[in-house]
Image (cartoon, rainbow, N blue to C red):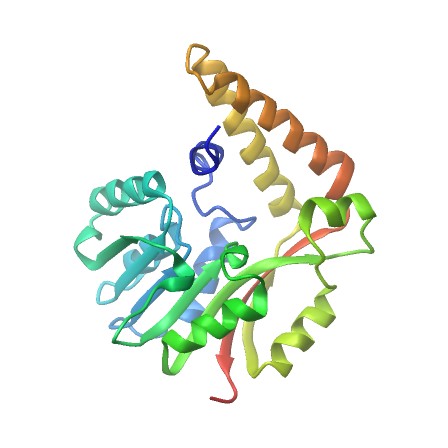
Amino acid sequence: MERSRRSQLAHAHHPIAAPLDDDAVRRLIGRAVTRDGARLLDLGCGQAEWLIRALEAHPGATAVGVDIAGNALAEARAQADARGVGDRLELLEASAADFTSDRPFDVVISVGAVHAFGGLLPTLATAREHLAPGGSVLVGDAYFLTDPTPEAVEMLGDYEDLATTVENIAADGWAPVYGHLSTRHELDDYEWYWTGSLAEWALDHPDDPDSAAALEASAVHRTEWLRGYRDCFGFHTLVLRPTKG
């Protein structure tokens, strides 16, 4: 089953595509986007839910979303048009790491997409290239709540604990001005949505060529979560401002 299709189906009922509830998303957008005329950029935007919600909250803002998944961008376009912000949202099917622009952005977003840049600090380095003076970066990524098992590291990657993660960000020339740590409810809710939405689609579409693969992917992911990384996985979403050029 093609990865971008699986991701779109798994996020059908949770389009923010990260373990955050609506109140957390609203607060983070409010702290990152501080004026209505802001220019926003989401690198690895998926279905562009962060941008759509920001545009809904800030009628004078404009936004650009970049992603390699054409199916996700098609859904983003449909949602943006249906919710009345389509005329202020530009969507580009391209590599987020290779995106260029001749104008800077007041807010650069990359939540759950740092793999596209090779890690958190490379993501921030790319964001810095696009950031206007006085701008903010809204970034979200994993960290380890407790010492992970070797199996968890193999599944997720070699993350740091929260304190080390924030220290590395600060040493790289960034000041956190706001942050959210996903709660146990948010983390579990996200996984139930991911696995459940995929299984639900498979059961509702038994004749689709991807049905069996989707059901298997749901089951495998659920086991990896419950047996492998549930107790050690955390997720931070931070609003950052540069302390140096």
* Residue 66 position within the rendered picture, expressed as x and y whole percent measured from the top left: 34, 56
Residue drawn where x is 60% and y is 38% of the image? 191
Residue drawn where x is 70% and y is 44% of the image? 155
* Residue 204 position within the rendered picture, expressed as x and y whole percent measured from the top left: 45, 15
195 or 85, nearer to the observer: 195
Q: Is residue 240 above or below residue 63?
A: below
Residue drawn where x is 20% and y is 51% of the image? 86
188 left or right of 177? right
43 or 16, nearer to the observer: 43
Q: Is residue 151 above or below residue 146?
A: above
Q: Residue furthest bottom?
A: 244
- State which quadrant residue 219 falls in: top right
220 left or right of 208? right
Q: Residue furthest left?
A: 87
232 left or right of 112? right
- State which quadrant residue 217 falls in: top right
Residue drawn where x is 23% and y is 63% of the image? 59
* Residue 95 position within the rendered picture, expressed as x and y whole percent measured from the top left: 38, 56
